């Protein structure tokens, strides 16, 4: 009854380590992460987290399966991982001087198949970014592979004026919700 993390994200592995949890297996789920027509950012985060967990559960029953997805939302618009520097610039310009939401979908499937879902909503207010700040950030490459084209735990932390909610959710996984879900389903970390 080990823990399978349905993610290849090094941030999620590191975050779990902060609370003394090491996944027994890392099995990234390979699903289509495109949003559906008229799907809101919060709905997308929840759907993708559950789809990832269920994909792994098809072949790995009898384990705890933890999956998560992070979606940056500006109004009704979803900002996925930027595909190139032009899209990263577009996202950063959109976020500049505005409040947006980071939605963290979490899905945990227990060894008996019981499914628990949570959605964590963190509001983030960015300062107005200058063209040179955006240029430097894009040149750093830190935006690559990050929802909304920024990483709060890196240099973009200096862009954040205010955060309301879970910081670790913005990084990639709300530790409060995750730990509570794991304990609630009876998970106990294995001792080394």
Image: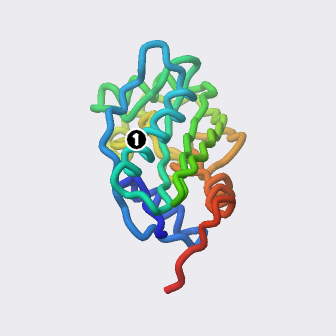
Q: Position of residue 59 (x, y in %)?
A: 33, 54
Q: Residue at x 60, y 72 (%)?
A: 188
Quarter assignment of residue 179 = bottom right
Horizontal relation, residue 85 to residue 45: left or right: left
Above or below: residue 166 compared with residue 186: above
Above or below: residue 190 compared with residue 27: below
Residue labelled with disc 1: 137
Q: Residue furthest left?
A: 84
Q: Position of residue 133 (x, y in %)?
A: 45, 36
Total labels: the figure holds 1
Quarter assignment of residue 27 = bottom left
For the residue pair 186 and 144, the one nearer the viewer reads as: 186
Q: Position of residue 136 (x, y in %)?
A: 38, 40
Horizontal relation, residue 82 to residue 74: left or right: left
Tag 1, which secondary structure? helix
Q: Residue furthest bottom?
A: 192
Q: Residue furthest front?
A: 112
Above or below: residue 37 compared with residue 72: above
Quarter assignment of residue 105 = top right
Q: Residue at x 63, y 49 (%)?
A: 167
Q: Residue at x 55, y 23 (%)?
A: 74
Q: Residue furthest top?
A: 38
Q: Pointer 1: residues within 10 angstroms few (<14), some, or many (20+)?
A: some
Q: Position of residue 9 (x, y in %)?
A: 39, 54
């Amino acid at each position: 009854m080990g823990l399978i993390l349905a993610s290849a994200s090094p941030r999620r592995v590191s975050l779990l380590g902060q609370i003394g949890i090491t996944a027994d297996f890392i099995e990234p789920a390979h699903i289509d992460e495109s949003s559906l027509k008229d799907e809101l950012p919060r709905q997308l985060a929840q759907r993708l987290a559950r789809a990832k967990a269920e994909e792994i559960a098809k072949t790995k029953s009898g384990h705890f399966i933890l999956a998560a997805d992070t979606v940056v939302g500006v109004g009704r618009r979803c900002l996925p991982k930027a595909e190139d520097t032009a899209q990263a610039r577009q996202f950063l310009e959109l976020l500049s001087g505005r409040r947006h939401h980071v939605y963290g979908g979490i899905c945990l499937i227990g060894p008996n198949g019981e499914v628990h879902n949570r959605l964590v909503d963190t509001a983030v207010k960015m300062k107005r970014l200058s063209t040179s700040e955006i240029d430097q950030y894009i040149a750093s490459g830190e935006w690559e592979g990050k929802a909304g084209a920024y990483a709060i735990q890196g240099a973009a932390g200096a862009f954040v004026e205010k955060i309301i909610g879970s910081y670790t959710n913005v990084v990639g996984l709300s530790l409060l919700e995750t730990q509570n879900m794991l304990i609630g389903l009876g998970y106990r970390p294995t001792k080394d």
